[in-house]
Image (spheres, grey):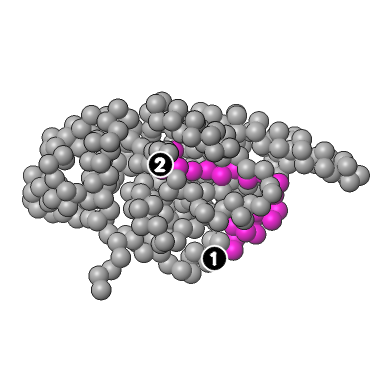
Amino acid sequence: MSTPPIQWYPGHIAKAERSLKEQLKRVDVVLEVRDARIPLATRHPQVQEWIASKTKVLVLNRVDMISPAVRQLWTQWFLQHGEKPYFTNAQQGEGVVAISKAAAEAGVEVNKKRSDRGLLPRPVRAVVIGFPNVGKSALINRLLKKRVVESARRAGVTKQLRWVRISDQIELLDAPGIIPWKLDDQDAAFKLAICDDIGEASYDNQRVAAALVDLLNDLIVTDPDLLPQSPLKSRYELDSAPFSGEEYLQNLADQRNKGDIERTARQMLNDFRKGLFGAIPLDLPPQPQ
Ligand SMILES: Nc1nc2c(ncn2[C@@H]2O[C@H](COP(=O)(O)OP(=O)(O)OP(=O)(O)O)[C@@H](O)[C@H]2O)c(=O)[nH]1
């Protein structure tokens, strides 16, 4: 049997899940960060159950990596599904004030319940959670207005646990909760790997890069208005439309890297992650059937 294109390490998943549940026990409000390019692939089916009745603020980060039209579509879709999305660019600080406000509002409710039980008010306790590399640390640093948590392009850099005060109203766990993913949904797994939002996993660069080309080819046909025209052709002067992902990679490798497919795959993934193909959504709101 051939190796699956994306593999998770069960030990890492179990450990991340335990530590996330531990963090969730201590807070009133959960700031769930997803990648705005893949808001569905960065959604974990069990998170809602883990969060239970706590207030959730849904953050779609990397808003700079999707177009305003895609942002608008997601806003409508989430509102229709009973959730208000907050869009941020945590790297630049855009949209972060609204997140603080939403968390502080949740605190009003928490303190009302406390006062009903004869308890004194206290700052609302919050935690930022999300898949690896979606921008949790960058968001925390922006909320704190300083660089406390290490934020890096490498996935999986976040470790210890501390409370930090954001304002009189909010205390934040400075270590984000990392949501681990499992292998059940291969489409989502490919998107996570393409966006580098999978942390402790190993994957086959060539199959992931080929999947990216196939996804882009589909998007060019189904939603041409929602992405730049011929993004691969613009970058590499080789049109992807006539090829499957695998064929395209082979052709591009021949043209640019003396047939070195692995090197070409890595370059392509890197270019995509740096936004060099333009603003490209890999998830779009599902159409009603
Ligand atoms: N373009 C863009 N880059 C971002 C944004 N937010 C974060 N980044 C970058 O994405 C990378 C990952 O961000 P982190 O804040 O380290 O992500 P994390 O979720 O804490 O990652 P882990 O610790 O691996 O779980 C860094 O290079 C950030 O600068 C954003 O809104 N837009």
Measured as percent of width and height from the top left, residue 114 is found at: 84, 44
**Label 1, on which residue?**
15
Residue 289: mark in rendering: 2
Measured as percent of width and height from the top left, residue 75 is found at: 49, 31
Residue at image point 36% right, 64% down: 7
Would you identify the image quadrant in which residue 116 lies? top right
Contact (Cβ within 8 Å) of mark 1 with mark 2: no
Compared with 92, 269 (above or below) is: below
Question: As shown in the figure, which amino acid type bears the numbered disc 1?
Answer: Lys
Q: CA distance from mark 1 to mark 2?
A: 38 Å
Mark with earlier residue (1, 2): 1
In the drawing, does residue 132 fall left or right of residue 256? Answer: right
Q: Does 142 appear in magenta?
A: no
Quick one: 289 or 134, which is closer to the camera?
289
Query: Magenta segment, which residues?
Result: 18-39
Quick one: 195 or 262, which is closer to the camera?
195
Residue farthest to the top, as pictured = 68
Compared with 8, 280 (above or below) is: above
In the drawing, does residue 13 fall left or right of residue 204? Answer: right
Numbered disc 1: secondary structure: helix
Residue farthest to the front, as pictured = 289
Numbered disc 2: secondary structure: loop
In the drawing, does residue 84 fall left or right of residue 162? Answer: left
Quick one: 176 or 30, which is closer to the camera?
30
